[in-house]
Amino acid sequence: MAKTYIFGHKSPDTDTITSSLVMANLEKALGNADAVACRLGGLNKETEYVLNYFDIEAPELIDDVEDDAQVILVDHNSPSESVDNLENAKILKVVDHHKLALETSYPLFYRAEPVGCTETVLFKLYKENGVEVTKEIASLMLSAIISDTLLLKSPTTTEDDVEAVKELAEIAEIDYESYGLEMLKAGTDLSDFSIEEILDLDAKQIDFGDVKSIVNQVNTASIPDVLEMQEDLEDGIQKIIDDEDLDIFMLLITDIVNSNSEVLVLGSQASLVEVAYDVTLEDNHALLEGVVSRKKQVVPIMTETASKL
Ligand code: MN
Ligand code: MN
């Protein structure tokens, strides 16, 4: 049988990486022996911590897929975030928790739920199919839910995520609160990264209507530590704005301990942030009280504000 490539989005995060592994395991359990977990980019520090902690090998790195390749998408469905040559591949399945951004000319298995993490959906799929959630699989699922929901504190968190974390922590035999904080902190270590890498780590191109935008997010235990790099960050951001012809670039610097974000904004439409959040940018940045979720607390409000231009 032909290989089935399973992967999450570019600039992979912990959910994307673990979901490709967990989905590949599910596919194999369901009889698809040629399912291969893949990834579209380097591991971030948090994901590295997770895989090292549980001694699990990273998915295979790929850049593109061949024509007519069979693929399964996890933790994304937008072609712009997906593998190169997706338009010539055959998408067999999607398991996701993002808004629908995909159109195909053929039917496919599509499972998306408005929950905090793809792994919460995968946990349900394991149960529905009677597939055993081993200690290793539970550890991966648990790590991703903690990552995507910032230890169940993000407003994207649903009852299903909370329930899943409790059940998975028991299977994995992990004190999820202490493990989770260590894991999140590991992800805030930016010391090995260049400015260009930091600005690419979790960058998402999300246009607010006609306003061409990139929203990037970095987690930290100390906002001032990140702002020490402000001058270099701004140089890097300005270069991306020029290269990509963007109207606005937002860097959310998210304090994982206090659940706030400082936003650093550049671009001709930077003032949209001031209108959207009723804040004043000082030296290009402002505190967004209680904002930790790009998906729930940035994209909708920025899109709405841009629509009133
Ligand atoms: Mn993701
Ligand atoms: Mn996710």
Image (cartoon, rainbow, N blue to C red):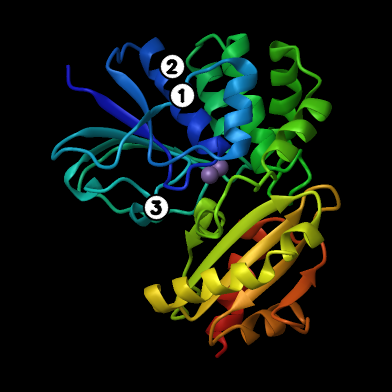
Foreground of the two, 307 or 55: 55
Amino acid type, mark 2: Asn
Q: Which dot, 1 or 2, sits closer to the camera?
A: 1
Foreground of the two, 192 or 11: 192
Please state the total of marks drawn on the protein image. Answer: 3
- The residues bearing labels 1 and 2 have C-alpha atoms spaced at a distance of 6 Å
Instruction: Give the residue at x 74% y 49%.
Output: 154
Q: Please state if 14 lies on the left or on the right of 166 as rendered.
A: left
Residue 263, percent across and down?
70, 69
Mark found first going from the N terminus, 3 or 1: 1
Residue 116, percent across and down?
64, 42
Where disc 1 sits, the SS reads helix
Instruction: Give the residue at x 70% y 60%.
Output: 253
Q: Kindly check if marks 1 and 2 are in contact, taking CB atoms under 8 A apart as contact.
A: yes
State the residue position of label 3: 81
- In this picture, is 135 found above or below 119? above
**Residue furthest to the right:** 258
- In this picture, is 301 found above or below 48? below
Instruction: Give the residue at x 68% y 69%.
Output: 230
Amino acid type, mark 3: Glu
Residue at mark 1: C-beta within 8 A of ligand 1: no
State the residue position of label 1: 21
Q: Kindly check if marks 3 and 2 are in contact, taking CB atoms under 8 A apart as contact.
A: no
Residue 262, percent across and down?
75, 66
Foreground of the two, 23 or 235: 235
Instruction: Give the residue at x 39% y 52%.
Output: 81
Q: Residues within 10 Å of mark 3 (few under 14, many from 20)?
A: some
Residue 285, percent across and down?
72, 76
Hey, which quadrant is residue 106 in on the image? Answer: top left
